[in-house]
């Protein structure tokens, strides 16, 4: 049996979900490795032959997938960004690289819409697609309500009956200015490239949110407002704006599920949080002062109650603060439920972890190949990468800049992982908890129970 290898780029977004999948695998007798993507990718030649599950279809992912294959691992892939996008054309141009799309032996789609976006890509080469959902969505199912309960209770005690604002402007307000790709596209706009138009739309929304925040806060006072920037965003932008506004707090970290469960609703534009809120029964308000049929994100905005100006937003937010269940009932009509069902698989019947493991079974059961020249050359390439990493870690703006990596994947100890594994295992109904041990900094092996 091969080992399941689950790299995580953003700890707060991905780690618990992939730990859940690792536990479900271990319950089937499949060993798993889960943890920081940067560390896992450096050690691919040191692991037993496994199935490496990539997390994006971008050109930057291609080299790691190829290295994994040269190390003797089989490769599957899902796209963490494959649930929410503006249009297929923009998704293809910004998130899908033709060679990366063809690299894995299996693609794992969030739902039918994600699968269609791959099937209809002009360079799709008939790679099998499993419409199996994502363990991030599984964590929002009723079986896992207890997993978030204590954290949600603490947030309510700390912040009161708050409204949540989630922003997703990392490409125009990035923690590392060199990563502001939308601003680069805006400067380089060409008539034949939709990325420039998308960047202009995103930048206009960013400015609109900055104008809206103090006005909304004053109108709703004393209702508390918590603003959570995207993990890659420069939080100081929002902290400066919120300074002197007593009912606004800018907060990083914590599980989005716990924040949503504790809140009276979320305000956003084109944010995955709206999908997660819908699954948890929390109202979502899409603030859309600037609209574009080409560049708006149809899923999260379509699931939400849409408002065009600050006055309408204030009225809708007040309704959420007064009775969040009634606000959600008005939102969750049959049309929106059908939209959710098409985009997120595994909400009814077998959950995503079971569907994913079923789809991966043929790859996991394939015997490991003998070590060969390709594995030795890959090991040499990875050794060079490890040697260069300390230099890259000191270069501000670089992808491997140490403070940025520490921000995206803060250190987590084995005792914390074991505690989370025990709680997740209880939600899964496991009779005994799989063993968890640390094998590198922020990387853990999950073993089948004896």
Image (tube, helix red, strand yellow):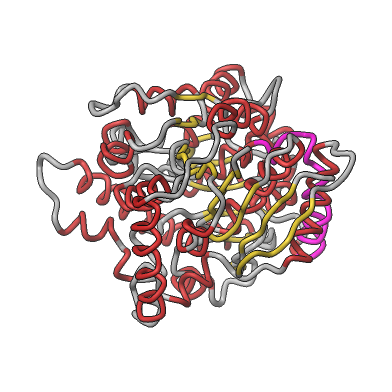
Residue found at the very far left of the displayed protein: 191
Horizontally, residue 121 falls left or right of residue 399, namely: left
Q: Residue at x 85, y 43 (%)?
A: 426
Where, by quadrant of the figure, is residue 12 drawn? bottom right
In magenta stretch: residue 139: yes
Percent from the top left, x then y, of residue 55?
Answer: 46, 46
Which quarter of the rendering shows the N terminus?
top right
Q: Residue at x 42, y 61 (%)?
A: 210
The answer to whether one can see residue 273 in this image is yes
Figure check: 59 above or below 244: above
The answer to whether one can see residue 215 in this image is no
Name the dominant secondary structure of the magenta segment.
helix
Q: What are the residue bounds of the magenta stretch?
A: 138-158
In magenta stretch: residue 259: no
Percent from the top left, x then y, of residue 357?
Answer: 62, 31
Figure check: 56 above or below 444: above
Percent from the top left, x then y, of residue 229?
Answer: 51, 61
Where, by quadrant of the figure, is residue 84 drawn? top left
Question: How many numbered circles are shown?
Answer: 0
Q: Residue at x 67, y 67 (%)?
A: 412
């Amino acid at each position: 049996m091969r080992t399941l290898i689950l790299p995580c780029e953003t700890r707060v977004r991905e780690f618990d979900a992939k730990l859940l999948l690792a536990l479900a695998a271990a319950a089937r007798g499949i060993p798993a490795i889960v943890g920081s993507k940067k560390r896992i990718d450096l050690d691919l030649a040191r692991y037993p032959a496994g199935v490496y599950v990539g997390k994006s279809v971008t050109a930057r992912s291609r080299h790691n997938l190829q290295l994994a294959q040269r190390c003797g691992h089989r490769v599957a892939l899902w796209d963490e960004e494959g649930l929410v996008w503006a249009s297929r054309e923009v998704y293809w141009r910004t998130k899908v690289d033709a060679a990366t799309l063809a690299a894995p032996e299996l693609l794992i789609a969030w739902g039918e819409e994600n699968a269609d976006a791959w099937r209809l890509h002009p360079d799709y080469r008939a790679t099998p697609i499993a419409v199996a959902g994502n363990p991030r969505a599984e964590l929002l199912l009723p079986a896992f309500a207890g997993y978030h309960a204590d954290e949600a209770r603490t947030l309510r005690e700390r912040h009161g009956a708050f409204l949540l604002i989630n922003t997703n402007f990392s490409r125009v307000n990035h923690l590392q200015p060199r990563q502001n790709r939308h601003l680069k596209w805006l400067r380089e706009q060409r008539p034949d490239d939709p990325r420039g138009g998308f960047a202009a739309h995103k930048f206009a929304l960013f400015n609109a949110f900055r104008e809206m925040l103090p006005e909304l806060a004053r109108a709703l006072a004393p209702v508390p407002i918590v603003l959570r920037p995207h993990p890659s965003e420069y939080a100081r932008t929002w902290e400066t704006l919120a300074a002197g506004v007593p009912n606004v707090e800018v907060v990083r970290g914590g599980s989005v599920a716990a924040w949503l469960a504790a809140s009276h609703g979320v305000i956003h534009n084109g944010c995955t949080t709206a999908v997660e809120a819908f699954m948890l029964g929390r109202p979502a308000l899409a603030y859309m002062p600037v609209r574009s049929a080409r560049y708006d994100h149809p899923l999260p905005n379509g699931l939400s109650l849409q408002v065009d100006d600050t006055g309408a937003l204030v009225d809708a937010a007040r309704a959420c603060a007064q009775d969040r269940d009634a606000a959600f009932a008005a939102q969750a009509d049959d049309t929106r439920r059908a939209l959710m069902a098409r985009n997120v698989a595994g909400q009814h019947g077998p959950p995503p972890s079971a569907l994913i493991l079923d789809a991966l079974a043929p790859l996991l059961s394939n015997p490991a190949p003998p070590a060969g020249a390709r594995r030795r050359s890959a090991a040499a390439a990875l050794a060079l990468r490890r040697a260069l990493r300390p230099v890259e870690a000191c270069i501000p703006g670089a992808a491997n800049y140490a403070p940025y990596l520490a921000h995206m994947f803060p250190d987590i100890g084995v005792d914390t992982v074991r505690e989370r594994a025990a709680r997740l295992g209880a939600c899964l109904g496991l009779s005994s908890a799989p063993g968890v041990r640390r094998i590198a900094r922020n990387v853990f092996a999950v073993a089948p129970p004896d």
